[in-house]
Image: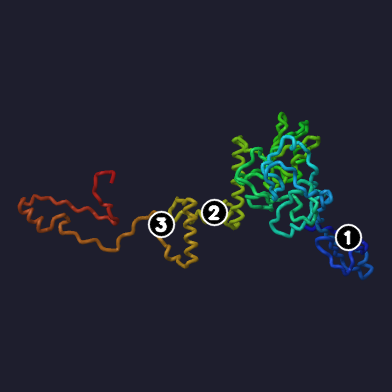
Amino acid sequence: MAEIDVVDSAESVSISAEPTQPDQLISNEETALTTQSAPADTEADAGQKKKKIIRRKRRPARPQVDPATIKSEPPPQTGTTFNIWYNKWSGGDREDSILSKHAAPSRCNIAEDSGYTRADKVTGSYFCLFFARGICHKGHECEYLHRLPTLHDIFNPNVDCFGRDKFSDYRDDMGGVGSFMRQNRTLYVGRIHVTDDIEEVVSRHFAEWGQVERIRVLTSRGVAFVTYTNVANAEFGKEAMAHQSLDHSEILNVRWATVDPNPLAQKREARRLEEQAAEAVRRALPAEYVAELEGRDPEARKKKKIEGSFGLQGYEAPDDVWYTRTKQLEDARKAGQLEELDQPHMIEPAAPSAEPPAPEAAGGGIFSSSTVAALKGLAGRNVITQAPPQSSGGPLVAYGSDDESD
């Protein structure tokens, strides 16, 4: 990003970061752009202040070490097969107890070493591993980024911020690139020289590589756990602080931290993942739909309260029923079939049948009139017939059963 400074002066003097010629084409990446107001034509305008806008482009990255001191010889043999991609011997990736106590030859200085490189023109570029260690000799000619990772730098979970492939499991010593099965943002820092202000010292040194979320120091063991808010910053800080020292001459042992067995820490990590997923959903959905889901839209709440009753007083449909019905109406409105979805409510009395009821037999009984007359004649007119029950509009409503289970 270019920096813009506004300078007020009474004299018409051109100010620029570097001296330029009038007919020279000024590059945005190497020099500064100076815009000056037009000169005053009258004496009255000469006394007015003039504003000069100075644009300074971010400086190019500088070489951290002298290129003449770089040797292209392979490292001493510590295994059986040499890996040309990682520039080391296979089988010797586990650090020796003696070699690991050698101090790092250099350290990265973000304030002075960071700058633009060729990788800034390429989208999705990785960060320079040698820049993080403070030994990159290419400067602005490097094909990798020379700056700190930010929240906008998102990479594939199978690789780290330096472009190295991750594995399914961690190494036995919790070193190396790491695992793609877990988002680890916590670093284990050993061999700390314990002092009274050790927490402030650890926070000051590790905060150079990104925003730190939490720091826990075990003074009795000389160990600290540093948790970053971003995974890329944790990966960068691990390489930047490997074999470095704090305010004393100690040589740090920086590794990936194992899973915290504390139940509170596990709940905190689960809550963070839920919040991260919710934030991703908010960014993917429209703003008005998110406001309706979260209940921040008063008009949507009022509409849901009215239409969610489905015509039944005192009934309020659940959210899944409400959104399912709303989606059906929206789909029907798009397809032009809104009239076909005019269905009856879920709970309402059955409509009366359009067909007239069948005519009953004379006398209202189960026998015909001739049979009843014959029975009366035989019994001396002492047969009593039962009046038919009144028919109801719905089926099976007048079913005369004494069993309550029916």
| Left or right of 337, for residue 395 | left
Residue furthest to the top: 220
- Tell me what residue is drawn at x 88 percent, y 61 percent: 16
Q: Residue at x 30, y 61 (%)?
A: 353
Residue 26 image position (x, y, % from top left): 84, 65
* Residue 185 horizontal side relative to residue 339, left or right: right
**Which is in the foreground here, disc 1 or disc 2?**
1
Left or right of 116: which side holds 395? left
Q: Nearer the viewer, mark 3 or mark 1?
A: 1
Which residue is labeled 3 in the image? 345
| Residue 315 x/y as whole percent | 45, 51
Colour theme: rainbow
Q: Secondary structure at mark 1?
A: loop
Q: Earlier in the sequence, mark 2 or mark 3?
A: 2
Query: Which amino acid, by three-letter code, is at mark 3?
Result: His
* Alpha-carbon span between mark 2 and mark 3: 22 Å
N-terminal of the two: label 3 or label 1?
1
Q: Which residue occupies 35% across, 55% down?
A: 349
Residue beneath disc 2: 301
Please tell me which residue is depicted at 90% across the width and 66% down the height of the picture.
21
